[in-house]
Image (tube, grey):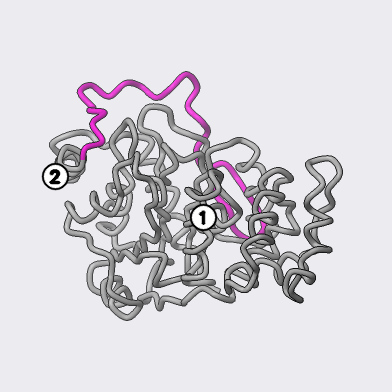
């Protein structure tokens, strides 16, 4: 057994005893561990044990804070033009059964002069890639950080692949097909902040327990952010059932818009087609005024506009 293998055994012993027998790591331990995971120095056997242990146990608040610190230290920074905060919009899931309106949200914000940075990666063969949809709308990933900064200054809208921002996360996300389950990196990717002190992060989660956990995390860190239940995993308000839209600033959280009881009013003729051409045409038509923009999306834009005006740190 190598020295590297020995060094992770005490941590695995703490977190690897299941949901009842395990004990959470301290913030410092979690930061050191996730730093090693991102840096690729954890051997495969131990890495698999850590991922599965965390998957079964679930991350504690202290562990999430430690993981966030390690991620922040390894995330490239993007300069934001003067004015409103940049809205950081993650995209990692893509469309499955309904149209993906994440680009619509981004383009509406940019049209109001609010800079938007779309960041993400796509690993699902069974879903329509959000990057192919963005390309159909003439939004291409920037070649590098400098190109993204230029796009933000010129058009208020830029897109970056995760590889450009936090390459250490890419290997961890790519383990999902191999192991069959998501891992802590999938949560951290949606918390990535390439413009600390100058950003509004839009954080979407699917499961109620993760919404509760990330709520506590954003409050503890004093983040300027929005938290919502994602639509098929994407960070836009469901046009048919507006989710609870929570906003965070100054270690406080409040409800910007409550969840829609019984579903939002039906939008006549709103298609469910996630195919790229149909999805792109729908977004163009909405932007041109040919179809109504769903009220949940307009509410999300309004809440993000307010957050973007919070003075920068």
Q: Residue at x 51, y 31 (%)?
A: 259
Q: In which quarter of the image is residue 113?
A: bottom left
Quadrant housing the C terminus: bottom right
- The single residue placed furthest to the front in the displayed view is 1
Q: Which residue is drawn at 53% across and 71% down?
A: 196
Q: Quadrant of residue 282?
A: top left
Q: State whether residue 283 is above or below residue 272.
A: below
* The one of 263 and 56 positioned closer to us in this rendering: 56
Q: Which residue is drawn at 30% across and 66% down?
A: 158
Picture disc at residue 175: 1
Task: Measuring from the top left, give residue 35's x and y in whole percent.
Answer: 64, 72
Q: Indicate whether residue 273 is drawn in magenta.
A: yes
Residue at mark 2: 288
Q: State whether residue 20 is above or below residue 170.
A: above
- 155 horizontally vs 171: left or right: left
Task: Measuring from the top left, give residue 125's x and y in whole percent.
Answer: 34, 44
Picture disc at residue 110: none
Q: State whether residue 72 is above or below residue 56.
A: below
Q: Residue at x 41, y 44 (%)?
A: 234
The reply to whether discs 2 and 1 touch (Cβ–Cβ < 8 Å) is no
Q: Earlier in the sequence, mark 2 or mark 1?
A: 1
Q: Which of marks 2 and 1 is in front?
A: 1
- Magenta residues, as a range? 247-275
* The one of 195 and 210 positioned closer to us in this rendering: 210
- The single residue placed furthest to the top in the displayed view is 262
* Secondary structure that dominates the magenta span: loop
- 200 horizontally vs 298: left or right: right
Task: Measuring from the top left, give residue 31's x and y in whole percent.
Answer: 70, 69
* The one of 39 and 84 positioned closer to us in this rendering: 39
Task: Measuring from the top left, give residue 281's x and y in whole percent.
Answer: 14, 41
């Amino acid at each position: 057994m190598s020295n590297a293998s020995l060094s992770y055994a005490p941590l695995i012993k703490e977190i690897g005893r299941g949901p009842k027998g395990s004990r959470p790591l301290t913030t410092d331990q979690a930061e050191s561990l996730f730093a090693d995971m991102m840096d690729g120095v954890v051997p495969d056997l131990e890495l698999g044990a850590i991922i599965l242990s965390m998957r079964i146990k679930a991350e504690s608040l202290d562990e999430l804070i430690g993981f966030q610190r390690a991620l922040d230290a390894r995330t490239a920074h993007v300069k934001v033009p003067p004015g409103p905060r940049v809205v950081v919009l993650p995209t990692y899931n893509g469309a499955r059964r309904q149209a993906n309106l994440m680009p619509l949200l981004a383009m509406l914000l940019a049209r109001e002069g609010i800079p938007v940075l779309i960041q993400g990666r796509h690993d699902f063969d069974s879903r329509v890639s959000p990057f192919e949809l963005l390309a159909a709308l003439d939004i291409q990933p920037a070649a590098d950080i400098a190109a993204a900064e230029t796009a933000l200054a010129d058009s208020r809208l830029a897109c970056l692949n995760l590889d450009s921002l936090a390459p250490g996360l890419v290997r961890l996300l790519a383990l999902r097909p191999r192991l069959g389950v998501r891992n802590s990196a999938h949560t951290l990717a949606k918390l990535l902040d390439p413009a600390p002190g100058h950003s509004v992060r839009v954080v979407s989660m699917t499961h109620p327990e993760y919404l509760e956990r990330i709520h506590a995390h954003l409050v503890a860190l004093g983040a300027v952010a929005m938290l919502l239940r994602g639509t098929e995993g994407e960070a836009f308000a469901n046009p048919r059932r507006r989710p609870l839209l929570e906003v965070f600033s100054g270690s406080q959280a409040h409800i910007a818009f409550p969840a829609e009881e019984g579903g939002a009013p039906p939008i006549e003729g709103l298609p469910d087609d996630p195919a790229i051409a149909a999805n792109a045409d729908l977004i163009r038509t909405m932007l041109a005024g040919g179809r109504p923009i769903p009220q949940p999306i307009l509410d999300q834009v309004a809440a993000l506009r307010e957050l973007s005006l919070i003075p920068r740190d």
